Amino acid sequence: MGPTEHSGARALNVVVGVTGGIAAYKAVGVVREFVLAGHNVQVIATDAAFRFVGKTTLEAISRNPVYTDLYEGVAEVRHVALGKAADLIVVAPATANSIAKLAAGLADDLLGNTILASTAPIVIAPAMHTEMWQNPATVANIALLRQRGITVIGPAIGQLTGTDSGSGRMSESPDIVAAALALVLHGHDLAGKRILVTAGGTREPLDPVRFIGNRSSGKQGLAIARAAALRGATVTLIGANLEMDAPATMDVRQVSTTFELAEATSAAAATADIVIMAAAVADYRPQAVAESKIKKETQGDTLQLTLVKNPDILADISAARRPGQVIVGFAAETESDRASLLAIGSAKIARKGADYLVLNTVGWTEGFATERNTVIVIDKAGDIVTEATGTKADVADRILDLFS
Ligand code: CTP
C-alpha cells in the first residue's frame, strides 16, 4: 500500500511519540502517512530515539519543530499544551522500556508528561525482540495498558534487526496510521457485528492453463473488509483470486471458481450479520473443461466454446437470508448516464432481492485496479441512501456507515 492519500476528513492534531529502538527509522513513514492524509503532526522524540533517527528528518517530514526536552518551552507549559491539543497520540515505535514507563505512569521526559497530560486516544506500536515481547514483565505491562483503553497495534511477525525473525517487528506504517485514524474517526462502531465480504473476480477454467475471468482487482472489497475490521467488526473475507498479503485482522479464505465462491459464501453467510458481495462473479462457465491444453492444430481457424449459466450467489443468499441479516450487492455497469445507471440498479436489486446495491460506472479506463472510486448506494425501493467518491478506503467507510 502506498502513502495514504488525503481523505478529505477532518484534520487532526496528532502527536507521534518516537522512542529509542531501531524501528525509529520507520517512524518517519508513520509521520509522513499522517501528514499526507492532511493531519497536523507534532513529533516528540526521546533522547534515545535520536540515536536511531535524525531530528532534521523528523522536522522536515512532520513540517513542525521536533521536541524532546521537558525543560524547553517551559513558559508555554509545552507538555500540557501538546497533550491538550492532541486528538490522537501514537507511540511508534514503543520499546519495551517505554511500554514499562507508560504502564507505570512515569513522566521523566516530555513524551511521558504529554501522555499523562492528555485525554486523547493513545495508540502504541510495539517493536522489540521476541524474547522481550514475550517477557512476563512486558506481557503484564501490555495487558495493563489494554485494560486502560490503550490500543496496541502489532507487533507483526517477521524479520527482526538481525538475521532472526519472530514476533516483535513493528507493524507497517500504513497499517498503524489506518488503525489509529479509524479509532479516532469511527471508534469501534462495528464491534459485535459479523461481516462477510467477498472480493476479487472468479475464474472459470477452460483447460489446465487458461481461464475465463474478469478485470476486477478486488481492491474495493478488500478495502471494505479492512475498514470493517478496523472498526471492530469480526470479518470473514472470501477472496476470489485475490493477490494480497492476508491481513491478520480477519479470517481469509481463497477461492477461484464461481462454484467454490458459492460454496464458501453460503457456508460463511450462515453466521454473518451482514454479507457484502463485492466479488465480480462469472455468470457463465465452460460446459466442459479440457483435461489437457487445447491445441490450435486440432481446432483450426475458429474455436467454439459452449458456456453454461452459473448459480446467482447473491440471489440465492438473499432468498435464504435469516431475519435481520443484511445483504449488499454490487453492480459495476458500463452505463455512465446517471438516470440509466439508477434504472439498471433498481431493476437489478429487485431481481436479486438484496437490501442494498452499490452501483458504480466502469469502462475500459474506469473503475478497475484504480485507487479511487465513485459509488451510489440504493436500497430495495431504488432510493439513493448514500453517494461517495474518494479513495477506495473512503468509499468503504461511507458504505460501512450504513451499518454502524
Ligand atoms: N453475483 C452473484 N452471482 C452471479 C453473478 C453476480 O452473486 N452469478 C453478484 C455479484 O457479486 C454482485 C451482484 O451479483 O454483487 C451483481 O453482479 P452483476 O454481474 O452486476 O449482476 P448480474 O446478475 O450478472 O447482471 P448482468 O447481466 O448485468 O451481468
Image (cartoon, grey):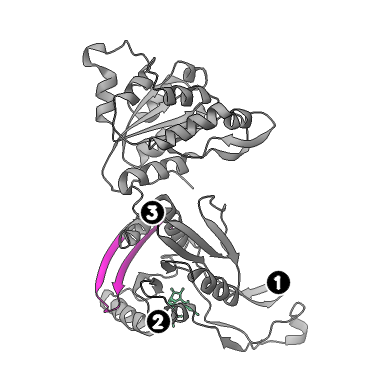
The label shown at residue 266 is none
User: Of the residues tagged 1 and 3, which is closer to the observer?
Assistant: 3
Coordinates of residue 138 in the picture (x, y in percent)? 53, 28
Which corner quadrant holds the C terminus? bottom left
Q: Decide: marks 3, 2 in contact (CB < 8 A)?
A: no
Q: Earlier in the sequence, mark 3 or mark 2?
A: 3
Q: CA distance from mark 1 to mark 3?
A: 43 Å
Q: Tell me which amino acid carries mark 2.
A: Lys
- Residue labelled with disc 1: 209
Coordinates of residue 113 in the picture (x, y in percent)? 34, 20
Q: Tell me which amino acid carries mark 3.
A: Ala
Label 2 beta carbon within 8 A of ligand 1: yes
Q: CA distance from mark 2 to mark 1?
A: 33 Å
Q: CA distance from mark 3 to mark 2?
A: 28 Å
Per the rendered image, the range of residues in magenta is 370-388
- Residue labelled with disc 3: 191
Is 279 positioned to the left or the right of 60 in the image? right
Observer-nearest residue: 212 or 41? 41
- Neighbour class for label 1 at 10 Å: few (<14), some, many (≥20)? few
Kindly state the secondary structure of the residue where label 2 is placed.
Answer: helix
Kindly state the secondary structure of the residue where label 3 is placed.
Answer: loop
Observer-nearest residue: 177 or 217? 177
User: Residue at 35% across / 72% down in the picture?
Assistant: 324
Please indicate, yes or no, whether residue 105 appears anywhere in the rendered image: yes
